[in-house]
Amino acid sequence: MNVRLALSAAAAVVTFLAGCGSGNGTTNARPTFTANPSLPGVTTRQSAPMTAAGIARGIATRWAAADGPVSVLNTPIEFREVDYSASVFAPGTSRGFTAFLTTRRTTVVMPSSAAMVDIVNYAPPRFATSIDQSLWKADGRPSLGQAPVNGQRLAFPAGQFSFLPQGSTLTYQQVTSLPSDPHQFAATILGHLHSYAGAHPPASLQLKQLGYLIATSPLSIKARSAAWQALASLPGLSICANQPIQARTHTAELCIDSPTDETQISVDTSAGAILAVTDRLIQSSPLYPHVPAGTVDNSSTFTTP
């Protein structure tokens, strides 16, 4: 499940609100820490290594040497993203159809792991094919799951917001306590995935967690370096086949394949930041009616608050 679908499902169990914060009002505090920071003193010219692991290790080394506080201040954090996700109806049946939704989300997370998520539609829904649109009409034009016209606000009580898209909750305070040793860091993330994916979570799933964690959470500088080192050590990490090594100077697309999907992170190699996390179908699946192989079925593109 895409992180945004998981987030919405969790919020549905918690609270739907039009504008109020938590009981103590702390979720209305002004954010003073921005997610996905750039490397301090970054230069505009970098000679990128020629392997995916080399790119990630190079960024980790530069973060380890960066000036700044070892730990993060206990302040609200804000991140924004454009989310693209599949909305699937009756998969595996002759009535099944797929549409794609694009939303813009602004998330503010408090040190208590209370959070507010503001959602607005960023583009009209798009059907996978004209057949899907016809099936939708035949089904009575059900809601595809897009946000209301005036937007939507989801509220998470203290302790409920997680910086991992899958697995057990990783709170704000747990993020700020993540170890600076890359092996311990990787082991901690694996521990959060066991309840979701068993004892041996696939490397593609680990890549997604690390991508989101780097892009959205209040990691300390040393833990941020450890996250990049853990990412570099994932088996199967490669430069994506759809991007030649000679592509744009300051960006790289790093991938890990699973039997059915390719998980991709887009990296700003100059800033040492994550630009996007993407899932792409390697082969067609009855879980995604009428969606051909090679199609992006979920992505989150991170933007500046």
Image (spheres, grey):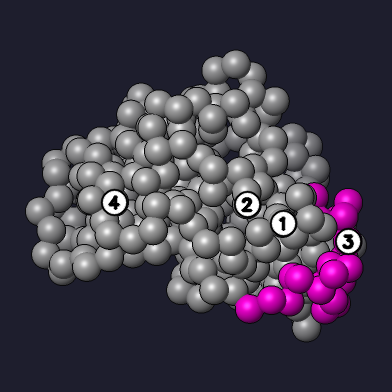
**Is residue 213 located in the magenta-colored stretch of the structure?**
no
Q: What x and y, as percent, mark residue 116?
A: 73, 67
Q: Is residue 303 above or below residue 172?
A: below
* Label 1 to label 4: alpha-carbon separation: 26 Å
Q: Residue at x 70, y 55 (%)?
A: 113
Q: Residue at x 70, y 71 (%)?
A: 119
Q: Disc 4 designates what residue?
A: 63
* Label 3 to label 4: alpha-carbon separation: 38 Å
Identify which amino acid the numbered label 1 is placed on.
Ser
Q: Is residue 81 left or right of residue 20?
A: left
**Is residue 29 located in the magenta-colored stretch of the structure?**
yes
Closest to the camera, between mark 3 and mark 4, is 4
The answer to which of marks 4 and 2 sits earlier in the sequence is 4
Highlighted range, magenta:
10-30
| Residue density around tag 3, few if under 14, some if 14–19, many if 20 or more, within 10 Å | some
Q: Is residue 152 visible?
A: yes
